[in-house]
Amino acid sequence: MLRTMETTQDVIVIGGGPAGLTAAAYGARAGLKVLLLEEMSYGGQGLLIESLENYPGLGEAADTFAFFAAMEAQARRFGAVLLTARAKSLERTGETYGVTTDRGDFTAPAVILAMGARHRHLDVPGEEALAGKGVSYCASCDGPFFKGRPILAVGGGDSACAEALCLTKFSQKILMIHRKPRFRAQKSLSDQVLAHPAITVRFSTEVREILGTDKVRGVRLWDNRMERETTEDLEGVFIFAGILPQTELVKPLGVETDKGGFVRTTPGMAASLPGLFAAGDLRASPFRQVVTACADGAVAAHSAAEYLEALRGLAYS
């Protein structure tokens, strides 16, 4: 149950993944009235990771549900209000932003966008059921769990080739497939993949089904040229079909994005409109991890506080 609260806030954070939770905690700890809106579960895409072992300071791999539950509790303890609600629209009138949700309407002079991004899926049987149980979308996140094991890499762009090369640090048994007859990645990356002894490449090949119940056991593949199906025994499936930033909410505002649709920001996480900040996976960034999302959230909250001080004539000089 949401406690009684004013609809006018200092900062509204949209999204409850690691970036949003950190932004809410840092903002509230700085004395700001912070409202965080999360449609689903606190932790966002981070909950798809079975365990978190590369976050600084963790002695052992952490259960992600427990990790993000602790982040949620911390944000509440600092005074942030967390509301399970879907943000339906975002508007700007003068120096005020208005957020319409399925739980009410809220306003604030500063908004931190932390809606994240979602991995483009193959939409094949077994993919959703085995996500986090052998199906992964991040080589650096989950590659260490597959040391020496046979794995499949799916994709043909720059990121797919780069991620496949990253996987060679952990396994020497990598099958890489692409549905087209050649990679669309830069030639330098394509050449490295094709020449690597740990990677076997099959073009014109697609995933038909990911096999397994409690974990990945194999895949059914379809060869478009030979028009035949094969089954491969594998323990991991890494899908690199791209990611889609969750920016539908801000498109009507004309926020500046890069060619991939990710929000461009300054080093202080400021977007192209005054009072609007972005953090985490929806922001244009060369690297996306839980730790970088948390860093983004902390910087965004700090910058939002400075913006509000300047707006109210309280900036330190």
Image: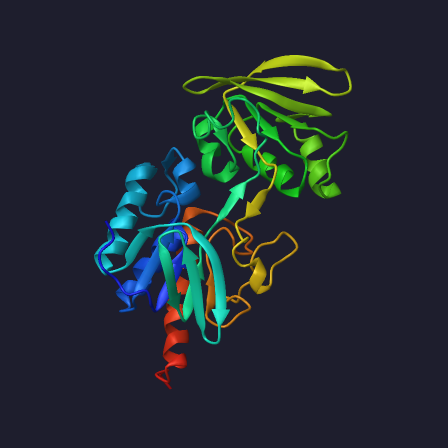
Residue 252 occupies quadrant: bottom right
Q: Is residue 303 visible?
A: no
Residue 312 occupies quadrant: bottom left
How did the renderer colour the structure? rainbow
- Side of 308 where 126 appears, left or right: right
Q: What number of labels is visible?
A: 0
In the image, residue 18 above or below residue 214? below
In the image, residue 310 above or below residue 107? below
In the image, residue 302 above or below residue 216? below
Residue lying at 61% horizontally and 37% vertically, measured from the top left: 241
In the image, residue 106 above or below residue 149? below
x and y percent of residue 227 in the render? 75, 15
- Side of 153 where 19 appears, left or right: left
Question: In what quadrant of the picture does the C terminus appear?
Answer: bottom left
Residue lying at 56% horizontally and 37% vertically, measured from the top left: 166
Near-viewer residue (211 or 174)? 211
Near-viewer residue (56 or 250)? 250
- Side of 46 where 181 appears, left or right: right
x and y percent of residue 176 in the render? 64, 27
Residue lying at 48% horizontally and 28% vertically, measured from the top left: 128
Q: Is residue 290 visible?
A: yes
x and y percent of residue 82 in the render? 30, 54
Near-viewer residue (110 or 199)? 110
x and y percent of residue 239 in the render? 57, 32
